[in-house]
Image: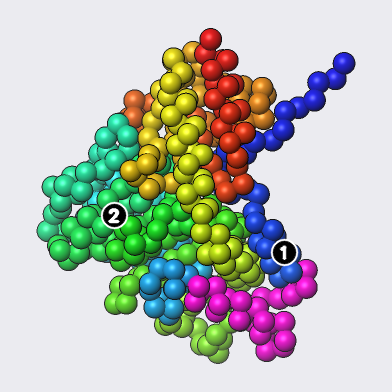
Amino acid sequence: MAHSSPPRRYLDHAATSWPKPEPVWQAWEQAARANGTAAGRGGYREAVAASQTMVRTRATIADLLGFPVDRIALPTSATLGLNQAIQGLTRPGCHVIATAADHNATLRPLAHLARRRQIDLTIVPCDGRGWVDPEEIAAAWRPTTRLVTFSQASNVTGVLQDAAAIAAIVSERGGLSLLDAAQTLGQVAVGEGISAADVIVAPAHKWLLGMHGVAILAAREGVECEPLILGGTGSASESLDLPTNFADQFEAGTPDLPAMAALEAAMEWLAAEEQVAGHCRALAQACREQVAAIDGIRVIGGATADTAGPPLFSITAAAYEPAELAALLEQLAGVQVRSGFHCAAQIHDHLGTAAGGTVRIAFGPFNTSADVDAVVSTAAALMR
């Protein structure tokens, strides 16, 4: 007799959100099917509508972040945006401070520049939760320090950094701060530290509930960032020089119109659904607390009632490798989570998980208490 598979329970929202709100699917499909043009590349009706979508999307982001709209760019991914910012803000011989809780989208380009002796790099430690003490950044400061990069929340543990304190230390010393908001924008209120940074980068496809193909790069007025990629922008096409306005400096190439339309729709949906972050956090907290009570399972990080971080945490199990535990959760209960090192090369030495990483559990807006029950009951059964 054939056995039916358990229902899909998607708990990997820290990697990418799924499913998307229905208006996001609709906006994406309308832009792809009915419009089908390239923004800024024509004067006919659909091309003008595409350009207006890009303008509206930038304006919505500017309102959210409290940045001038002319300081918002839409690169094709957060990884590209972080590379553009790092390459554009660093100078030969300068000193850069990063943190052990950072994502490889930040650490790898910095390590590459350090290996080529273009910069000096210090990676300050985090504690066993993934939290970085701002005083570690102050202690690492040098006369040549120009840039400090940090993730507002660890993508492995969900622990929220004191972004405001870090940005203040950098500002007081005359440096620049680059904040990776991949795990916070859309979940954590902007006033809780995001807007304190000089440069902010975030993808659309995670907690903002948009699609792959577009990201956010925002910089404060006066922050000069050299462009990394040169090419067509749809403007000043008669010149071999890249236009000097901020968006064109970081949007060379054909923009992904469906992704931008989806991001606009997603941000409108999030603004209307005010309880999304609280719903996600409540599920993550309930799951975290119940799993922590199971003998043989270690819980690492996670938001609590007192910490408004993203709705994710990690676990390890004494009897299973992370990859094995993740596979069993899907096979037995349809629970889809990520195992391994989560594109974070430095944090696991500090978490004590360098042997195989962790299993990361991340809740989204369409998860329910039934998903919590599936994780808890299956994990408990596996540990008996």
Q: Which mark is residue 271?
A: none
Look at the image and tell me whether residue 204 can be seen: no
Q: Are marks 2 and 1 in contact (CB under 8 Å)?
A: no
Q: Image point 48% across, 41% down: which residue?
A: 282
Give the residues in magenta.
33-60
**Residue type pointed to by label 1:** Gln
Query: Which callout, 2 or 1, points at the residue further toward the start of the chain?
Result: 1
Image quarter of residue 142: bottom left
Specify the quadrant of the image occupied by residue 192: bottom left
Q: How far apart are labels 2 and 1 at the CA level?
A: 35 Å
Residue 48 painted magenta? yes
Can you give x and y, in whole percent of width and height, for residue 71 in the image?
40, 76
Relative height, residue 297 to residue 202 (above, below):
above
Q: Which mark is residue 26?
A: 1
Q: State the residue in front, 299 or 237.
A: 299
Mark 1, Cα crowd under 10 Å, few <14 / some 14-19 / many 20+, is: some
Q: Which residue is mark 2?
A: 163
Percent x, y for residue 341?
45, 34
Q: Image check: 20 left or right of 192?
A: right
Q: Residue furthest right?
A: 1
Q: Position of residue 7 (x, y in %)?
A: 72, 33
Q: Give the residue drawn at x 44%, y 50%.
A: 183
Q: Is residue 165 above or below residue 44?
A: above
Residue 227 visible to an observer of this rendering:
yes
